[in-house]
Image (cartoon, rainbow, N blue to C red):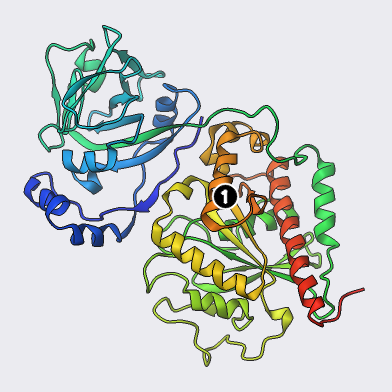
Amino acid sequence: MVALRDLDFVVDYVVIEAQQPTALKELYFHDHQLQTFLEDVMSVVKSSLSVEQERKLLSLFGHVRLHLLYKASVHGYMSLAFHSRCDGQGPTVLVAYNRAGFVFGGYISKDYAQTGQAINDDKAFLYSITDQREKPLRVSSTDGQYGFTDGAYGLNVGALWFLNNNTATVQVVAGNCYAFEGEEMHGNDLQLTECEVYRVEGCEGILETPWRKIDLEGYGTKDRLMDYIKNYKPEVKSVVQARVLLVGPVGAGKSSFFNSINSVFKGHVTGQANTGSAGTSLTTQFRTYNIKAEQGGKALPLVLCDTMGLEEGPSAGLDIDDITSILKGHVQDRYQFNPSMSVQTDGVGFCKSPSLKDMIHCVVYVLDACKVTLLSAKMVDKLAAIRKGINKMGIPQLVLLTKVDEACPLVREDLTNIYLSHYIERMTREVSVCLGVSQSCVLPVKNYSREFELDIHTDILLLTAVVQMLRYTDDYFDDIYQAGDQKSE
């Protein structure tokens, strides 16, 4: 099964009460500028499904992942809000919640299009989940053809009509093709506490041959990668440690990546850098993290540099000018960022005359595999602007694609499927096109987040990513050497 990803995305963060249909209509149709402005407001929208409810819901499908489109408590119990977010999305499942403890709703395999027609959909069904039942109740159409009515007033799956009256209630429709007992379906409680709609995405199965060849088996591979990192020596005499900058949206997993690498070398899961889920960056300082080869050992020839997360707003998150100052080596460890202004040249922690050892030698963009398709145009533009500036400085760039186990159920079941997954391969291609980098520069990894113990396959993916960073750093030092600096023996 796939863990339902917590969805962070741009929403109109204005909760219109169900008693105000006119206001919502004005918002959606008569004031486009206001709507556009509201869509720029960032918020965090999370699924209301518990882990167990999610497991039971996913058992109704094959290998799929769920993508949250609509949440009534945020977008309003309004058919207009529902259709603006759910029309044309392909297969979807509606998830309704009531105070009786039932999670119930309907699945349709075809688009909402507001045609007003009865739609034949032999894959459509109603379902119900409760804590008292181990398996979900699943009810298909009795005639094997009729699926749902594609109207303009919410989801009408034969017997149950959701959002029909722009209220948090469900209407029972008489004379239909679905047969069930109300007590079993919804506990005779038609008043909703929440209503959500998810797009149901297939994960496209397993490839016959890996799309990238990496040995994920055995401690020999892990030891070889660790030895490479421990014995790495920068190609320029004046530099002892390669400095790698991690850049990415809030919550992508930059700090978690450092914690994960640190865990591999310490031999147990650690949490030195602050991590967690928040709407704004948990990292507010520029941090440079050294990693020791083992407990009490010497530092590795690598420094991972962590920054504030990227945010869309002009006065939020890491600024492009801040990144330039970091790349040039002006920003020292524990420099406190101020989101409302760029790095101050007279501030504490600003280095006015940095040397090559203070500069950044490789930049790594960190992106959540679950949210690649949710990157807004503003975030893509911001990443493009950053990449353009870094290109001018000749600094090599890579991409870490995190949370691959949450993005693909096949990978979650077995991490060794990562290079056999159609979905992960497609995600790396999409990231490649989005950021303008080679697909070989996109490295899928899984950070440690909820585990207590290390996993050999997770370790190998993480170490492989670090080895690639060091190899790309060597490319940078080769350019520096050609420019006149002395090369190490």
At 54% from the left and 44% from the top, the residue drawn is 427
Q: Is residue 94 left or right of residue 299?
A: left
Callout 1, which amino acid?
Thr
Q: Is residue 320 left or right of residue 128?
A: right
Q: Quadrant of the C terminus?
A: bottom right
Between residues 414 and 92, which one lies in front from this camera angle?
A: 92
At 22% from the left and 21% from the top, the residue drawn is 187
Residue 112, relative to residue 354: is it above or below?
above
At 42% from the left and 81% from the top, the residue drawn is 341
| Residue 49 seen | yes
Q: Position of residue 96 (x, y in %)?
A: 26, 32
Name the residue beneath numbered marker 1.
402
Rendered image quadrant of residue 220? top right
Q: Position of residue 376 (x, y in %)?
A: 40, 56
At 81% from the left and 42% from the top, the residue drawn is 219
Q: Position of residue 476 (x, y in %)?
A: 74, 70
Q: Is residue 51 left or right of residue 144?
A: right
Q: Position of residue 57 (x, y in %)?
A: 39, 26
Q: Residue furthest right?
A: 489
Between residues 125 and 437, which one lies in front from this camera angle?
A: 437
The total number of labels drawn is 1
Residue 454, relative to residue 180: is it above or below?
below
Name the secondary structure under disc 1.
strand
| Residue 270 seen | no
- Crowding around mark 1 (Cα neighbors within 10 Å: few <14, some 14 to 19, many 20+) is many
Between residues 136 and 317, which one lies in front from this camera angle?
A: 317
Q: Residue furthest top?
A: 143
Q: Residue furthest bottom?
A: 346
